[in-house]
Structures are given as C-alpha cells and as structure tokens.
Image (cartoon, helix red, strand yellow):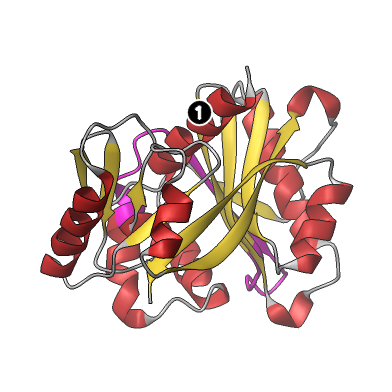
Amino acid sequence: MNNKKVIQKIEELSINALPALETELVDGWILRFSNGYAKRANSINPLYPSKYEIKEKIEDMQKIYRSKNLKAVYKLTENVFPHDLDVILEQEGYELDGLTSVQLLSLNEVSVSPAANAVNYSYLNDKWFLDFCKLNNIKETDQATLKKILQNIVPEVCYVTLLNDNNDALACGMSVLEDEYIGLFDIVTNEKHRSKGYGKQLIYTILNWGKENGAKNAYLQVVLDNRPALNLYSKLGFKEEYRYWYRIKS
C-alpha cells in the first residue's frame, strides 16, 4: 500500500472511530459537525477529488459552518484535493494549528500482555466515561456531546481503565477496531501518577486486546508538542507514517 493509500485508509478509519453528530458529503469533501466539541469532529476533510471552483467552494464552506455557529476548520494531509489546498487556504488567511503525527505499528513485531489492574469494557461504561472526562479535563458543557459521539461508534470498541486498590483511575483510553487496524485514542495518565509506566501498561492492554480480536496493525495520533507521548510511542515501536494539521480562519 503506497503512502497516499495509507493516508486515505487511516483517515477513513479515524473518521469512523470518532463519528461526528452530523456529516455531509459535498463534492468529495466530508463535512463534520459536533456542536464545536473537538476540531476533528467539526472539520472539513478534503479526502476525495472535487470539481467545484476552489475559491467559491471555500466561501461556501464558510457559509455552511457559520450557519451552525462554527468556525470553518480544515483537516489536511499531504493527500488532499486539490493538492495545493493548503497553500490556497494560507493565502486566504487560514492559520496553521495542531500539527499532528500519525504513527503505525505492525502488531506482528510486538509481544504484549494486559496489565493485571486493567478493566476493559466493550460498551460505554458510566464509570469509565466519568474517569475519562476527569483525566482529560472535559468541560461539563461538552460531556453530553462527547457521550453521543462515543455512542454512535459503529466498529468494535474497547474502553480501558487502569485502577489502583482504591478503584481510582490511574490511566484510561479507548481503541476502535476496524478492518484489522486498531486505533488508539485519548490515552491519558492521571497527572498524580505520571512517569510510573501506567501509560505503557494501558497501551499494552489495548494492543493485546486488538491482537486477540484480529488486529494486525495499530495506529495513533499525537500532537508534535507532546514530547513525553512521542518518546513513549517511539519506545513501543510506533513510527510516523504521515502528518495532519488544521487550517483555521484567523
């Protein structure tokens, strides 16, 4: 699979892994709307070839998102249509934001086992959700939207928490399995218990679940200014496949 096909594949998988509350396909571009929660769930994804005149189309996107009281946010990779879209958006006053590394790992190359204190759920468990929101500092006003997004996931999901003896969350995260790829999302460690190996234990638990359920590859997304996470994923064998970033009207 060449790089462009890999990009399209992972982008499609990640869209399915975090389904927007509303989605619209316009001339090859996927428009996502989720009450403003998370840029990726409220973004324009130019994944497929388009025919409309580009500057008129950009204006149309502005109008569509403005009608929903949202900023027009573009999620871009090296494989977008048209190929010079990033340059055009920059010229139109869209600022760069959120440069992110998308990394892959072949599960044939790793031997992993689950943590003894890990709890897995195949459904959206209330305690997991509360712990997840607390560790990720999800605003109370966004929690209802997030819950709807998670409830709308179609592929198989694994929600994981590492607990201490007091039943407190040490780390938590989630993964989505589709077409032999397992995506890891929002891996977070309790700030009181960082640098103790809990993030690694959580990831091993997720990867073990993925392998047991037929996954052959794992992918994740990490912003480039998160040096601790980049170091951890590198030690685990993840390698950058491509990058994505956002363009947002200033």
- Magenta region includes residue 150: yes
Task: Say if 36 sits above or below 51 in the image.
Answer: below
Relative placement, left or right, of 140 versus 90 is left
Q: How many marks?
A: 1
Residue pointed to by mark 1: 9
Comparing 83 with 195, the one in front is: 83
Q: Quadrant of the N terminus?
A: top right
The residue range painted magenta reads 149-171
Relative placement, left or right, of 117 versus 86 is right
Residue 80 lies, in percent from the top left, at: 45, 39
Check disc 1 and give the amino acid type. Lys
Task: Say if 145 sits above or below 142 in the image.
Answer: above
Q: Quadrant of the C terminus?
A: bottom left
Comparing 2 with 84, the one in front is: 84
Quarter of the view holding residue 204: top right
Residue 21 lies, in percent from the top left, at: 23, 53
